[in-house]
Image (cartoon, rainbow, N blue to C red):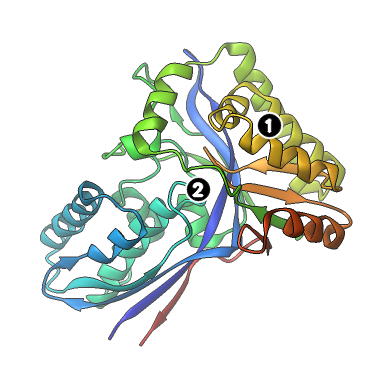
Amino acid sequence: MSVRVSVPSRVHLTLIDLGPTGYRRNGGVGFGITTPRSTFAFAPHAAVDLRALESYGYLPAEIASLTKRLECLMSQQQLTQGLRLKDVQLPARHGGFGTGTAAALASLESLFLLNGLSVSPEFLRANCGRGGASGIGLSSYFKGGFVFDAGRRFDSAPIVGSDAINQVDELPLEMARLDMVDWPMGVLVPPCASATSPEQEQAFFSHQLPLSAADVFETTYHAIFGTLAAVQSRDYDAFCASINALQRCAWKRAEIDLYGDTVRTCAAYLASVGCDAVAMSSIGPALIFWARDFDVAFAAAECQYGPSAVFRTSPDNTGRILSHD
């Protein structure tokens, strides 16, 4: 028996509450997309072997950490069967697609399935070690769709990214999950933008945070009264306006600035060929774009950047697909 898992990528539009005080910490809005996908094939094995992740940029320490997590669960749950990752295909790591969460959840879920057990999404969320900064990937893995989460209760510890958190004591609070509207959508991975390393990301968090209360309030307004409300009401114009407004808010503006002029130049080009909204996912550099006359805008982007950098996608309102051999 082997287990195959096909996971939609997640688009993370923004973190929300990154201020020095408040009710909550982090929170965010985002949604699942059908393409690109992370696919995994696991086979039974005497131990836990995730070495195949090396070919997609996983560092030995990252693989060792995930391996140890699965080994501890095998011991705690008295599981007799380990697993080997025999095949994997991932989008570019640290590109904004949520591959770290996809790999952790797929490995954990497959471990139990190979032992003949089915465990709840709540158990998997609580034990995968992800969700320290955002709950979008945790939710979209299981059911896709548009997600608004309100983070966790405020604490005074320094704000760090997900990759810097190995133990998540309080999961993000999911407030809403909606089917994402199927507005024509594409992805551009800026050809000259190098992905941000975990070390660069943590230095960025340390340097930029906390945000001012005014910056937090502005982001919250556009994320909830703009993007969330527009998805619920299927209001394309309001959705695009809020997406563009979020790019101008302090946090997303700083994330985009990490790439100098590279990402901004790509976003400006997309707007110039008719895109109604352009959003950088997470800390980037992938850009998501929407246009009423999508075929024209897509053709122009493909001509400018090449077919390997630009592709069509659509909302994923289903979540991961499991199959057994």
Q: Position of residue 160 (x, y in %)?
A: 38, 28
Residue at (75, 47) in percent of width and height: 231
* Alpha-carbon span between mark 2 and mark 1: 17 Å
Q: Position of residue 129 (x, y in %)?
A: 30, 46
Q: Camera-side residue: 178 or 92? A: 92
Q: Earlier in the sequence, mark 2 or mark 1?
A: 2
Q: Relative to 7, does residue 290 appear above or below in the rendering?
A: above
Q: Is residue 269 left or right of residue 315?
A: right
Q: Relative to 170, does residue 59 appear above or below in the rendering?
A: below
Report the mark closest to the observer, 2 or 1: 2
Residue at image mark 2:
95
Residue at (43, 24) in percent of width and height: 205
| Label 1 Cα crowd, 10 Å radius (few <14 / some 14-19 / many 20+) | many
Residue at image mark 1:
247
Report whether residue 283 is seen: yes
Q: How many marks?
A: 2
Query: Tag 1: residue type?
Result: Gln
Q: Position of residue 92 (x, y in %)?
A: 47, 55
Q: Quadrant of residue 17?
A: top right
Query: Tag 2: residue type?
Result: Gly
